[in-house]
Image (cartoon, rainbow, N blue to C red):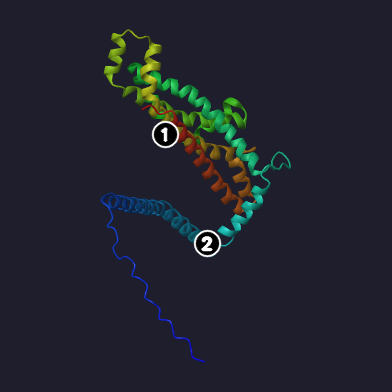
Amino acid sequence: MTPAPLMHATPAPEAATEVAAPTEAQLKAAAERDALTQAAARRRRERLAAFVQQVVPGIVGILLFLLLWQGVAQLVGNFPGPAKVWDSAVKLFSDPFYQKGPNEQGIGWNILSSLKRVGIGFGLAALVGIPLGFVIGRFATMDRMTAPIISILRPVSPLAWLPIGLMVFKAANPAAIWVIFICSIWPMIINTAVGVQRIPQDYLNVARVLNLSEWKVFTKILFPAVLPYMLTGVKLSIGVAWLVIVAAEMLTGGVGIGFWLWDEWNNLVMEHIIIAIFTIGIVGLILEQALIWIARRFQFE
């Protein structure tokens, strides 16, 4: 049998090698895409760098603080370290509103009692201090009359006012509110008065030419111009009020975060003392940030 002849494969015709050159519009679009991609990558890098610069130093600081704290706990006997305090805080805040008697309440009730006292004392100080600041800043005679009194009374230690409050009110709670009132009123008076005094005289001259009433001068000129100064005074005052309440409650007793801290010291529960310190700091920070937020909301441009 004769083998079939092998078929010779014919080479495929070569593909066309000529490729159309990109147009100028395609080149421009590609360049724009590259530019957008690079810009997006650059923005991501900038955001990451900003995040690292903002967050990492804080984390490092906290870690160093905890390390230092642990070192002190190792050196000083009976001083609790971070882990022990954290365990106590978890147990404490798992039931913050228990009540087992007038002198044994959860930390939540004590914080609320302190905030209530601060709210009353601080509110009364704002009701008196801000209008008084407007009057002092508006009238030079009032400024000269009150300047010596404010200069003498403002540096007085908060606890020096407590005996006067106890003598006048015959009770611990109003005495503590009195201390908050008298200590937080000065920043509001001074900042409001300074704000009024820094209003350009031309504004007041225009009001005089237009024969505006004192109410119109207050609502249209004084208040918008003084508001930033006034809010700065309010922000300083809330910090002072929160500082003062802790010291006042340590002496007056009853219920409150200051009293709770002192009571834990008498019971020698160091973990709770450290928890109280952190709680006071965090609540104070929240109050200050809330006032900063309010100040930004009411800022006139």
Above or below, 51 relative to 244? below
Q: CA distance from mark 1 to mark 2?
A: 37 Å
* Tag nearer the camera, 1 or 2: 2
Task: Give SS at disc 2.
Answer: helix
Location of residue 97 in the rendering, given as x and y in whole percent from the top left corner = 68, 42
Compare marks 1 and 2 and give the one earlier in the sequence.
2
Residue 268 visible somewhere in the drawing: no
In this view, the residue in front, 22 or 171, is 22
Secondary element under disc 1, as helix, strand or loop, is loop
On residue 155, the disc is: 1
Residue drawn 46% across the image and 28% down it = 185
Where residue 285 appears, as percent x and y from the top left, is 49, 41
Rendered residue at 35%/70% (across/down): 13
Q: Label 2: which residue? A: 70
Hey, what amino acid is under mark 2? Gln
Q: How many marks?
A: 2
Can you say whether 18 is above or below 3 in the image?
Answer: above
